[in-house]
Image (cartoon, rainbow, N blue to C red):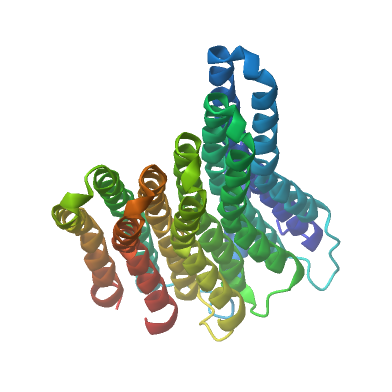
Amino acid sequence: MDFSPETWDMLGRYVGAGFALGLGGIGAAIGMGMSAGQAGEAMMRQPERHGYLLRTMLIGQAVGGSPSIFALVVGLLILFLPSDAATSGPIFAAAMVGAGLSIGLGCLGSGVGCGWPAAAACDGVARNPRRATPITSAMIIGQAVAQSPSIFATVIALILLFIPLTSTGVVAVGIAIGAGLAMGASALGPGVGSGTTAGGAVRGLSAWPRSQAITIRTMLIGQAVCQTPAIFGMLVAFIMLFTLQDMEMNIIGLAKILGAAIAVGLGGIGPGIGCGMVGDTSCEATAEKPVNDALLLRTMLIGQAVSQSTAIYALIISLVLLFVI
Amino acid sequence: MLDPSVVMTVTDAVLAQAEPQAAITGAEVIKAGALIGAGICMGFGAIGPGIGEGFAAGKACEAIGRSPENAGLLTRTMLIGQAVSESTGIYSLVVALLMLFVVGA
């Protein structure tokens, strides 16, 4: 029993689209639920402010829903992208699965992350309705930055969809799935972490609205540091996609690529979430007492740098697997 | 239900791409296992220390926000706590390097 190229194409498309939407929908759904839950709780306390609250909840959900829209677009491309006889076959199928893993896992983290600022904004608007506009704008900035890991994942998924792999054989199958897994899994933690950082900033600004500029600065620095593991994952994905033509074409080459992808992908989850916890409390404390901002920024950066260390170990292991062994 | 023969066919077809070296020896399988194992070891091993160290640093930031005059003491405690949480990450690194350079070599 041997499969025709068309069968391979369909197999890859259905599995890939399943990963894309199955995983990519989880995050945004959780994030939107957090926002709605907090809005409901706030309405129970202050029912007369339901108009403000409904508006804030809907804005937060609309912006926080965009990772799932990326996943939907890429999922539809995976299903319906035209393929020709030259590209059909197992390697095309693997590229579809890899694109699905990248976008699915990548959008999961950002979708959950966008829920924290949205929930904090609903709570803040209920307590302090006159400050609804600055609270909402801090929420939108935080959510937009929290989405960048999902944008990295979209880029890698689109490269897998539109640029045929130059390698052949079992190594090409490994590269397609490995690049998707490295990017997708490593974007998961940074998406969540950037979101918790933004949540802390919005929570702080709701209570102490005067320190807006300094809090948003600390939030943006914290979010940028949170995203380092996703950048490591994207780096490894690019290395896999464009520089591994001379990898040996056997099961050991496949093992090196998959091992490197698992190391850098999973290794990014913890540091991303951990950096987010640091950013969360640091932003809130900066909003409360902006006079301490230099001290808090320094402590946040030291804490985040130390949390990143395991992501750097994971990057080293994956580079050793790809280039040294 | 998933038919096992379909899974076997897919696995065989993926491995058949490895031609012309179609015959896979036991030594190659062991080396491949060590290489993937190194990746799994470092990947999963990095999750816990990352979250744990972030938790410690988050609490330190919260405490410094409340009492900035104790910043030196708090930073020192944070770094000691993080260094201890780091230990399992270093174990993972050591085991991954062993699998790369000793077992899988």
Q: In this rendering, does residue B2 appear at all? A: no
Residue A229 position by quadrant: bottom left
Left or right? Give the position of A212 relative to A158. Answer: left
Residue at point 13%, 54% (across, down): B73
The residue at the point 48 percent across, 70 percent down is A257
Q: Nearer the viewer, residue A97 or A199?
A: A199
| A252 in relation to A264, above or below | below
The furthest residue to the bottom: A246
Q: Quadrant of the C terminus of chain A?
A: bottom left
Residue in the foreground of this view, choosing between B100 and B5: B100
Residue A296 vs residue A26, the one in the foreground: A296
Residue B29, how many percent across, how many down? 39, 68
From the top left corner, tell me how far across and down residue B40 is, in percent: 37, 58
Name the residue nearer the viewer: B15 or A50: A50
Question: In the rendered view, does B78 fall on the left or right side of A185?
Answer: left
Q: Is residue A44 above or below residue A38?
A: above
Where residue A279 sits: x, y (%)? Answer: 40, 51
Q: Is residue A61 visible?
A: yes
Task: Return the x and y of residue B3 as percentages of the image width and height.
Answer: 61, 41
Q: How many marks?
A: 0
Figure quadrant of the N terminus of chain A: bottom right
Image position of B25 with respect to A304: above or below: below
